[in-house]
Image (cartoon, grey):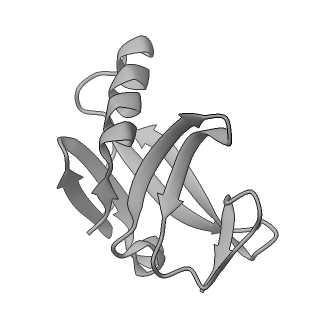
């Protein structure tokens, strides 16, 4: 399961509304190679499912990820911060053994 915090839910709805995205658009989360710790998160809106996608819904938000990424993202919570320590989406990933200082990359 991939979870969506209340803060992320509100921001996703705000972005979807301001971008005039149709209701069939969902949040696609994936893990890609890169970053100072080896792996990075990728977050986007999409409306096309792929054959091996894993589909979750939490807090009223549909989240989709590919099977390979899901192995890294299991039990991760998507959050959003608008505070002084940085603004943006963040991944609270219990599988990450190490993260970089900016929080945008990790390793397992």
Residue 82's x, y, as percent? 55, 33
Rendered view: 86 above or below 66: above
* Apparent side of residue 54 relative to residue 34 in the rendered image (left or right): left
- Image mark count: 0
Residue 63's x, y, as percent? 31, 52
Q: Find residue 39 and report its image quarter.
A: bottom right
Residue 73's x, y, as percent? 43, 72
Residue 47 can be seen, yes or no:
no
Quarter of the picture holding the C terminus: bottom right
Residue drawn at 78 percent across, 65 percent down:
35
Which residue ends up furthest to the right in the rendered image?
A: 36
Viewer-side residue, 28 vs 104: 104
Residue 82 can be seen, yes or no:
yes
Rendered view: 85 above or below 52: above
Residue drawn at 41 percent across, 53 percent down:
78
Residue drawn at 30 percent across, 41 percent down:
6
Quarter of the picture holding the N terminus: bottom left
Viewer-side residue, 49 vs 28: 28
* Apparent side of residue 86 relative to residue 30 in the rendered image (left or right): right
* Apparent side of residue 88 relative to residue 70 in the rendered image (left or right): right
Residue 64's x, y, as percent? 33, 56
Viewer-side residue, 108 vs 44: 108
Residue drawn at 57 percent across, 54 percent down:
42
């Amino acid at each position: 399961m991939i979870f969506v915090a209340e803060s992320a839910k509100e921001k996703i709805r705000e972005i979807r509304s301001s971008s005039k995205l149709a209701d069939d658009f969902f949040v696609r989360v994936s893990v890609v190679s890169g970053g100072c710790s080896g792996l990075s998160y990728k977050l986007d809106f999409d409306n096309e499912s792929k054959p091996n996608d894993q589909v979750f819904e939490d807090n009223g938000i549909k989240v989709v990820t590919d099977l390979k990424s899901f192995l890294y993202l299991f039990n991760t919570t998507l959050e959003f911060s608008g505070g002084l320590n940085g603004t943006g989406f963040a991944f609270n990933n219990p599988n990450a053994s190490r993260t970089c200082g900016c929080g945008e990359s990790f390793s397992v």
